[in-house]
Image (tube, rainbow, N blue to C red):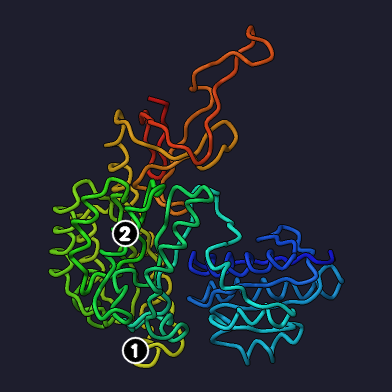
């Protein structure tokens, strides 16, 4: 155990990561030495920011906490603090089942950690986060909560009603991040397109996106987690107008069968979905759409699943993820439906859907061969530099691999008779010609 060191472990989504970074920024300003996701926790305090979205995430959170209790027994670490979605929903249960936890906070009261340690939360530091992502990109969360109440989702139960952040606060945060070297802003929310209605009486995502795009230093702006119902169509011309807004939209659709969509309480039909997707592609030419689909929802028949397969073949999403339904207690589905699709059928449908998507993804990737794209470099990994195009979000989308041996040679500063390959700088943009395509990665060379 190392005195004055705090380790913070973040589980779950990028929205959790933003909370962790804000907390770490405050703790660092108080003089603590902060470590994020350490392989070998040694802090006098270890904070776990938990996820409680689905069963696997809950299990990961519990196992992480139990692992820390063993370290605590061996005096490798000091106190254990737990915060986040899991503890928001199961605070009493965690306290009773794992008494080794020293303090438990929820999704919204974790600022109390500062006062419990004898410090005050400093509002003047609200834009100063302890950035855990590469220094050239950052996630910016514009709201909390969700009003959609989809039948399968526990998020509204955990986070409550939709709450938009003040636009001026978001813009100040973006400006601060840019001053500190961030080139790429990942705009995130549980429902990005619902922004502003609760605070300003109207949807304001288009206005917010335009103001961020106009902020000097924002090279790329990427939009995550749109909702298809009541989609704010005034966002599309803004996306088309500004070259620094990535031609990329993450919009979870979940299904394509009207029967299943109705049972999911999605309040949209397949036809309405197809019309929306067509309009997005018409107004923002070249856009890459990322979506998420679900198999095995209660009542999903083989005909429903085949209808979704047809939908995916027709839409040819450039990016797609999928998962099998997992019942979450307290949701509409858990209270009103029987989880009647056998696990083996769920897995079979998931495998079939993802096999189809792999074929579509490969075809989309192959269409990039011979073309030149602006690529941001994220890191060096072995014999490659690894980057992304504007069509690729960090960690979830395909990457561009540039073999170091393909780079031009330059004389070394010590001995001009010796030559080495030029170095690419993480966080900088380069023009890259794509020479080879795989389903989930591209191989390129400097243009």
Farthest front residue? 124
**Distance (Cα) linking label 1 and label 2:** 44 Å
Q: Indicate the quadrant where residue 232 lies.
A: bottom left
At a point 66% along the width and 84% down the height, the residue shown is 104
Farthest top residue? 417
Q: Position of residue 168 (x, y in %)?
A: 39, 68
Q: Indicate the quadrant where residue 142 lies.
A: bottom left
Number of the label disc, if any, that sits on residue 98: none
- The 10 Å Cα crowd at callout 2, few under 14, some 14 to 19, many 20 or more, is few
Q: Which residue is mark 1?
A: 337
Mark 2 lies on a secondary structure that is helix
Task: Of the two numbered discs 1 and 2 on the same chain, state the one appearing first in sequence.
Answer: 2
Q: Please state which of residues 354 and 91 is positioned toward the viewer in this rendering.
A: 91
Q: Which residue is mark 2?
A: 211
Q: Indicate the quadrant where residue 264 lies.
A: bottom left
Q: Please state which of residues 153 and 173 is positioned toward the viewer in this rendering.
A: 173
């Amino acid at each position: 155990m190392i005195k004055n060191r705090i380790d913070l472990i973040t589980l779950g989504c990028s929205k959790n990561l933003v909370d962790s970074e804000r907390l770490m920024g405050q703790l660092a300003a108080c003089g603590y030495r902060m470590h994020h996701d350490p392989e070998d926790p040694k802090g006098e305090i270890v904070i776990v920011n938990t996820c409680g979205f689905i069963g696997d995430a809950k299990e990961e959170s519990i196992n992480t906490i139990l692992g820390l209790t063993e370290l605590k027994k061996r005096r490798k670490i000091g106190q254990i603090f737990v915060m986040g979605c899991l503890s928001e929903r199961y605070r009493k249960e965690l306290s009773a089942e794992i008494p080794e936890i020293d303090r438990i906070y929820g999704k919204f009261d974790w600022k109390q950690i500062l006062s419990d340690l004898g410090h005050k939360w400093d509002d003047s530091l609200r834009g100063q986060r302890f950035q855990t992502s590469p220094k050239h990109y950052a996630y910016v969360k514009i709201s909390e909560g969700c009003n959609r109440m989809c039948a399968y989702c526990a998020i509204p139960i955990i986070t409550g009603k939709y709450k938009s952040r003040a636009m001026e606060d978001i813009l100040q945060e973006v400006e601060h991040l840019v001053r500190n070297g961030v080139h790429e802003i990942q705009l995130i929310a549980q429902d990005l397109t619902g922004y502003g209605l609760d605070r300003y009486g109207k949807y304001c995502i288009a206005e917010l996106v335009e103001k961020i795009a106009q902020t000097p230093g924002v090279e790329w702006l990427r939009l995550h987690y749109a909702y298809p119902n009541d989609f704010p169509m005034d966002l599309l011309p803004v996306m088309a107008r500004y070259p620094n807004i990535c031609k990329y939209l993450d919009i979870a659709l979940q299904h394509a069968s009207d029967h299943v969509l109705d049972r999911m309480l999605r309040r949209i039909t397949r036809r309405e979905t197809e019309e929306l997707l067509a309009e997005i592609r018409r107004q923002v030419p070249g856009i890459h759409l990322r979506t998420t689909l679900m198999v095995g929802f209660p009542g999903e028949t083989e005909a429903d699943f085949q209808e979704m397969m047809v939908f995916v073949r027709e839409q040819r999403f450039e990016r797609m993820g999928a998962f099998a339904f997992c019942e979450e207690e307290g949701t509409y589905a858990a209270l009103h439906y029987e989880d009647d699709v056998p696990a083996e059928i769920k897995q079979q449908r998931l495998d079939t859907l993802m096999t189809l998507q792999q074929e579509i993804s490969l075809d989309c990737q192959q269409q990039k061969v011979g073309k030149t794209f602006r690529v941001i470099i994220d890191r060096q990994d072995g014999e490659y530099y690894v980057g992304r195009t504007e069509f690729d979000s960090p960690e979830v989308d395909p990457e561009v691999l540039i073999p170091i041996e393909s780079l031009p040679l330059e004389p070394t500063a010590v001995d001009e008779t010796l030559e080495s390959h030029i170095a690419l700088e993480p966080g900088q943009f380069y023009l890259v010609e794509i020479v080879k395509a795989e389903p989930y990665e591209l191989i390129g060379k400097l243009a």
